[in-house]
Amino acid sequence: MKYILISLSVFLATISMAQQSGTWNGKKSAVVLTYDDAIDVHLDHAIPALDSLGLKATFYLSVDSPGFSERTDEWTLVAKHGHELGNHTMYHPCAGNKPDRDWVRTEYDLATYSLDRIQKEILATNFVLQEIDGKKERTFAYPCGEYMVGDTSYIPLVEKNFVSARGVVARMLTKSNLDFYNVNSYTVHGQSGEELINLVKQAVEHGRLLVFMFHGIGGGHSIDVDLEAHSALLHYLKVHEQEIWIAPMVEVATYLRK
């Protein structure tokens, strides 16, 4: 009886590991690298680092940003290199009625928006991005992680137009606790390369999906990580890509939704 119980335990553990591995496209875990706001340093620092290692990421673009509107030809090449151009709205509206939101411009205060306005700006951004990359399917990221217009959520609008959407709450995910329209992510701000790598190790150990959210890369934004830490993370992922699925958000979400 003892032998039978031990054998059953080993058998169940093997099944669990196989299911866990199968969830992430045959790998032990999945990592998605996302970059917000169409900042110049994404083109100057992040893209060269990613391309040098053959890694693919998602760039959430606010198309009114000078980092996008003044460099559209370069973003066209980014898409051709296999990266996702994600929708981060036209003007990046955030609620200006929250603490420390003096930087929110009155005309782009989400607290004063209507559902019709946010929908038009999101769809207009989709049109611009499709003109650049030719794609009809992509993912969305809520500016400031916020999705309320007054007392109404605009998540239903997002559900109609995107494969998935990224949020801002820091949590690693299993398939069972994954909300496709509010995917959790870890904000990268000042962490060392070792700290970022340790998060990846935890994801691999527990068979989780880990999404990183970057802004500044070696400058360019108040939310920033230095070039050395960013490089250390990318090189670690490359070395361990046999056990980690590294792909843009749209690819991961499409696979998991099948």
Image (tube, helix red, strand yellow):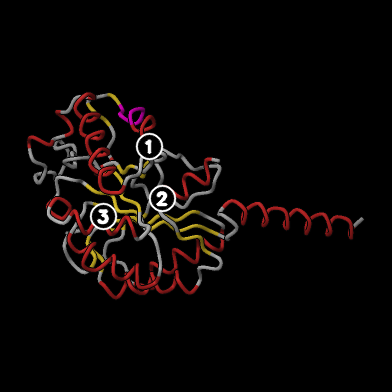
Q: Nearer the viewer, residue 87 or 69?
A: 69
Task: Say whether residue 80 is left or right of residue 219.
Answer: right
Q: How many other residues sit within 10 Å of disc 1, few (<14), some (14-19) or many (≥20)?
A: some
Residue pointed to by mark 2: 249
Q: CA distance from mark 1 to mark 2?
A: 11 Å
- The picture places residue 139, in percent across and down from the top left corner, at 36, 43
Task: Say whether residue 106 is left or right of residue 248.
Answer: left
- Dividing the picture into quadrants, the one containing residue 124 is top left
Q: Earlier in the sequence, mark 1 or mark 3?
A: 3
Q: Looking at the rendered structure, which numbered label has been put on residue 162?
A: 1
Amino acid on which disc 2 is placed: Met
- Dividing the picture into quadrants, the one containing residue 1 is bottom right
Q: Nearer the viewer, residue 219 or 39?
A: 39
Prevalent SS, magenta region: helix
Q: Circle 2 — which element?
A: helix
Q: Circle 3 — which element?
A: helix
Q: CA distance from mark 3 to mark 2?
A: 18 Å
- The picture places residue 41, in percent across and down from the top left corner, at 20, 64
Residue pointed to by mark 3: 76
Q: Is residue 107 above or below residue 49?
A: above
The residue that appears at 26% across and 55% down in the rendered structure is 76
The residue that appears at 34% across and 33% down in the rendered structure is 158
Amino acid on which disc 3 is placed: Thr
